Image (spheres, rainbow, N blue to C red):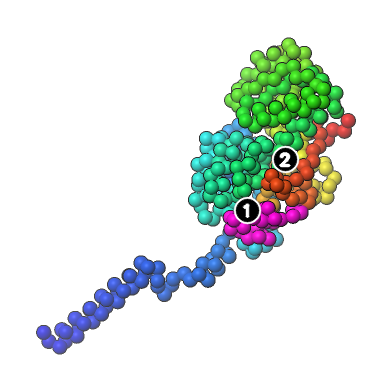
Amino acid sequence: MSARVRFFSRIRSVSLASVVFTLLLTSCGISGTSTTPSDSAAQEAKSPVVIGVSGPLTGDNAEYGKQWRKGIDLALKEINANGGVKGRKLEYVFEDTQSDPKQTPAVAQKFVADSKIAAVIGDFSSPASMAASPIYQRAGLVQLGITNSHPDFTNTGDYIWSNTSNQKDDAPYLAALAVQKLNKKRLAVLYLNTDWGKTTTELFVGKAKELGAEVVVQEGYLSNEKDFRPILTKARDANPDALILISYYNDGALIAQQRDAVGLDTTVVAIGSVYSPQFIKLGGEAVEGVYTATRFYPGDPRPEVQRFVQAYQKEHNEDPDSFSAVAYDGVRILAQVMEQYGTDRKAIRDGLGSIKDLDTVLYGKASFGPDRRLQNPRFLPLVVQNGRFELWNP
């Protein structure tokens, strides 16, 4: 072999070795453009903080999810305008579950597997939320239930929290409203036959009897039921002086409408879940005079309420309800905790247990108690008058 041939052969060998060496370095993640730990931290510092939201955007409970979204959007707009969370933009991903307990576990699995999700809000109904709670607990991802009033909701573990009141508070207050303030003594109770509905009814009935009322009818109905005339007839025949509804806005409105068909003309008192614009839209004149109770009312003169109401009206050209308000509060609570304690999942859990005097619309200054719920819920009685909810002053 000539010297010239040997020379070029050596060059080809060296070049091939260089290529092989470069490929090996690249496959091991080592190259001239590799990401160092400091680069990763810098990238994370620029990336948004993401909240997962599990709730209904379609189906019978869609209006609740739409109201949530309005409150969440306003909260994010305000938070990001003030620098976000630790200088990072705050965003959310909303997964539609129809508030169906059969759908929420799959959404929970999706959220826990996504490392970008820092915490989760939802689901709407307690049964739907509680079906997913064990998944969040095992994975160490905070689930903040903004409308989960079932007494057992937070019992799953230390990653399960709620900024709404407990039915141990809500249902007895409704009983006091019916029996003491409205002076109703013979009660016909119709309730949604779910774990939430049955638990709420038990708490209501227990308090009503304690206050001296008689429960003359106690009937459950299915969530997909549309014809309420049979149970309304049974209620009519018991001659009650008040009809108590443990219902959501859609079924509650239908029940109110169908009273005339059976000749049941009596006072209606409904749990706070009916406090939605859709209740009046669906029920029309049939819901005039219905009493309920709420933790939030836009006419509340407290400064934190009026600041929120004015911002919401400017953003959405309508008044907020309790569902948009509690969603707004939920996002702001998580933002306050992350700003003070950090954005990783465990830091958020620890921060919820440590932070004091959170700024909220529904409660004013508030902190979480040992049951991982905000303490000291407050209630306001409402009545439907002239096609709108009004504060009731007896």
Disc number placed over residue 143 in the picture, else none = none
Q: Amino acid at mark 2?
A: Ser
Place of residue 42 in the rendered image (x, y in percent of width and height, measured from the top left)? 55, 68
Place of residue 28 in the rendered image (x, y in percent of width and height, measured from the top left)? 37, 68
Residue ranking furthest to the left: 1
Q: Amino acid at mark 1?
A: Arg
Query: Which residue in the structure is indicated by mark 2?
Result: 165
Task: Determine if the magenta segment contains residue 259.
Answer: no
Q: Which numbered disc, 2 or 1, marks the residue closer to the eye?
A: 1
Q: Work out whether 94 lies above or below 170.
A: below
Disc number placed over residue 349 in the picture, else none = 1
Of residues 341 and 95, the one drawn nearer to the viewer in this rendering? 341
Residue ranking furthest to the top: 237
Tell me if 389 is positioned left or right of 160 in this view: right
Crowding at mark 1 (Cα within 10 Å: few <14, some 14-19, many 20+): many
Residue 89 visible: no
Task: Determine if the magenta segment contains residue 345.
Answer: yes
Q: Work out whether 201 lies above or below 335.
A: above
Place of residue 278 in the rendered image (x, y in percent of width and height, measured from the top left)? 69, 33
Q: Which residues are magenta?
A: 336-359
